[in-house]
Image: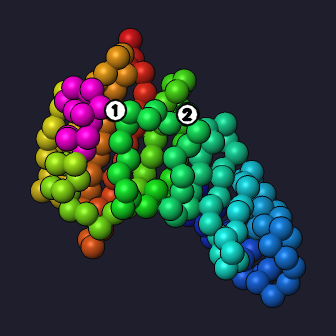
């Protein structure tokens, strides 16, 4: 629900500021509008003046947008494949060196499962879990060197939603 508030606040700010000011002034106005709702946000506009990303300063380093980069420190041995549009990144709460990434792709769940299983195995990960709790959802789990990575794939109509969580194993 808080994400909806963020986008609503930023949408209002975008409309209010569309007719005036440079890119930095527009970013500051959108950030001020978010602040009115108790949200400390950093807004970045793209070359077209559209919102490229929003970073929520809540201690988790959450960023939402489209075609985002992986966060600094994301493990290089956890494949996030080309063709995925990353829409959200954040640290894993309570986990040092843990990350959550959400992405969208036009690839099917079956294609993603095949690619993830192949790429994770090639990167030295052991598959520990794979299931399909519903026909529209698949889950994959992997472990390596005291770490775990889980993928949740969901059919989202014409696209597939992907959530990747990677962190140290608890315990």
Whether residue 88 appears in this view of the structure is yes
Which colour assignment does the render follow? Answer: rainbow
> What is the quadrant of residue 8 in the picture?
bottom right
- What label does residue 149 carry, if any? 1
The residue carrying mark 2 is 73
Percent position of residue 14, x then y: 72, 77
Disc 1, SS: strand
Depth check: give the residue in front, 154 or 70: 70
Horizontally, residue 165 falls left or right of residue 141, namely right
- The correct choice, above or below, for 135 with respect to 117 in the image is below
Percent position of residue 28, x then y: 83, 64
Depth check: give the residue in front, 12 or 154: 154
Q: Does the CB distance between marks 2 and 1 fall below 8 Å?
A: no
- The correct choice, above or below, for 86 with respect to 101 in the image is below
Whether residue 33 appears in this view of the structure is no
Disc 2, SS: loop
Residue shown at the point (67%, 71%) measured from the top left: 46
Q: CA distance from mark 2 to mark 1?
A: 15 Å
Percent position of residue 27, x then y: 78, 67
Horizontally, residue 111 falls left or right of residue 40, namely left
The residues colored magenta run 116-127
Q: Residues within 10 Å of mark 1 (few under 14, many from 20)?
A: many
């Amino acid at each position: 629900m808080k994400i909806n508030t963020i986008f609503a606040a930023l949408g209002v700010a975008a409309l209010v500021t569309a007719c005036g000011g440079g890119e930095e002034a527009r970013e500051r106005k959108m950030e001020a509008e978010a602040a009115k709702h108790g949200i400390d946000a950093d807004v970045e506009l793209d070359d077209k003046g559209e919102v490229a990303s929003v970073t929520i300063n809540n201690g988790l380093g959450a960023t939402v947008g489209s075609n985002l980069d992986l966060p600094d420190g994301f493990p290089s041995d956890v494949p996030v494949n080309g063709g995925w549009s990353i829409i959200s990144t954040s640290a894993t709460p309570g986990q040092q060196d843990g990350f959550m990434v959400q992405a969208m792709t036009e690839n099917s769940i079956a294609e993603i499962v095949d690619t993830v299983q192949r790429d994770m195995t090639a990167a030295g990960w052991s598959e520990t879990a794979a299931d399909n709790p519903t026909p529209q959802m698949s889950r994959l789990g992997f472990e390596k060197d005291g770490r775990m990575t889980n993928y949740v794939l969901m059919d989202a109509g014409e696209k597939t939603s992907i959530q990747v969580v990677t962190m140290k194993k608890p315990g």
